[in-house]
């Protein structure tokens, strides 16, 4: 077992790891060491369990299988696994934003939640093209909250906060036709297009992957 100073260079972490070791409390470091070596297929992103026919494992080096049961290749499995992790992360973080939008809506509707920074609310409203003149804080809170919640179900166009990205990044996204249209829509579409039944993504142009449309079944 590694010592606390072998596990981390951060003084606070070393102090905590010394304490957990003294009190026999398991940490992520203990559990990681207990699993060595980790699964080589999983580490390479070449294990797929997207459907009940799996799990399928691709052998990138030897004479083992080069395709999953559905016909997915190593590139497809790795790309799908990465895309699905991105979708999970997007779902988690965006749902925090959804909660904030709900809280803002409740604040505007007279609950115990209060808007502490009215100037920021007015700035955001103006940024999103919401008229701010002659509106009190409650009215604005409701309008901004409803506009924010609408971003989740939006089907077309671009998310409002895309304009906050650096200009070259926005251009790259538009050139590749990957600007997010709606928060929930993109998460759902990734899960759909990476599920069994799709050997590749059905819109190669949208994902900029150069893959062709191919059906597995
Ligand atoms: S989606 Fe394809 S590669 Fe993945 S588990 Fe199912 S059959 Fe195997």
Image: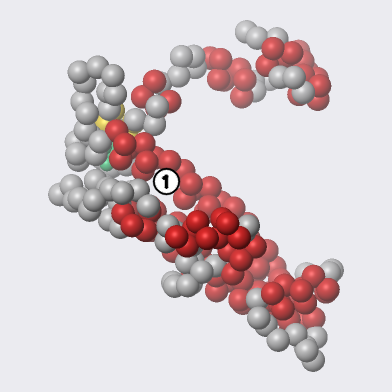
Question: Where does the image place residue 43, in percent across and percent down from the top left?
Answer: 43, 25
Q: Is residue 112 visible?
A: no
Residue tagged by mark 1? 83
Query: Which image quadrant shows ligand 1?
Result: top left
Element class at badge 1? helix
**Which of these two is toward me, 23 or 98?**
98
Residue at 24% across, 51% down: 212
Locate residue 57 relative to residue 178 in the image: left or right.
left
Task: Count neighbours of disc 1 (C-alpha within 10 A) and say few if under 14, some if 14 to 19, many if 20 or more.
Answer: some
Q: Is residue 83 visible?
A: yes
Q: Percent from the top left, x then y, of residue 83?
A: 42, 46
Q: Is residue 139 above or below residue 2?
A: below
Which quarter of the picture shows residue 12? top right
- Residue drawn 71% across the image and 19% down it: 8
Q: In this rendering, is residue 190 above or below 181?
A: above
The quadrant in which residue 52 appears is: top left
**Location of residue 48 by image quarter:** top left
């Amino acid at each position: 077992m590694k010592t606390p100073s072998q596990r981390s260079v951060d003084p606070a972490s070393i102090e905590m790891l010394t304490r957990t070791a003294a009190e026999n409390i398991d940490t992520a470091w203990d559990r990681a060491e207990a699993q060595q070596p980790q699964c080589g297929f999983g580490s390479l992103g070449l294990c797929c369990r997207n459907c009940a026919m799996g799990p399928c494992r691709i052998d990138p080096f030897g004479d083992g299988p080069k395709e999953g049961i559905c016909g997915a290749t190593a590139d497809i499995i790795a790309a799908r696994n990465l895309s699905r992790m991105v979708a999970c992360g997007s779902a988690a973080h965006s749902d925090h934003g959804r909660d904030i939008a709900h809280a803002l809506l409740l604040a505007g509707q007279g609950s115990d939640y209060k808007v502490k920074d009215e100037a920021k609310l007015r700035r955001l409203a103006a940024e999103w093209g919401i008229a701010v003149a002659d509106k009190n804080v409650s009215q604005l809170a409701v309008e901004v909250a409803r506009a924010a919640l609408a971003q989740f179900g939006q089907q077309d166009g671009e998310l409002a906060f895309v304009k906050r990205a650096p200009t070259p990044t926005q251009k790259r996204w538009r050139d590749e036709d990957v600007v997010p249209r709606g928060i929930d829509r993109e998460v759902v579409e990734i899960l759909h297009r990476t599920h069994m039944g799709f050997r590749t993504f059905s819109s190669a142009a949208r994902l900029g992957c150069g893959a062709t449309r191919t059906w597995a079944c």
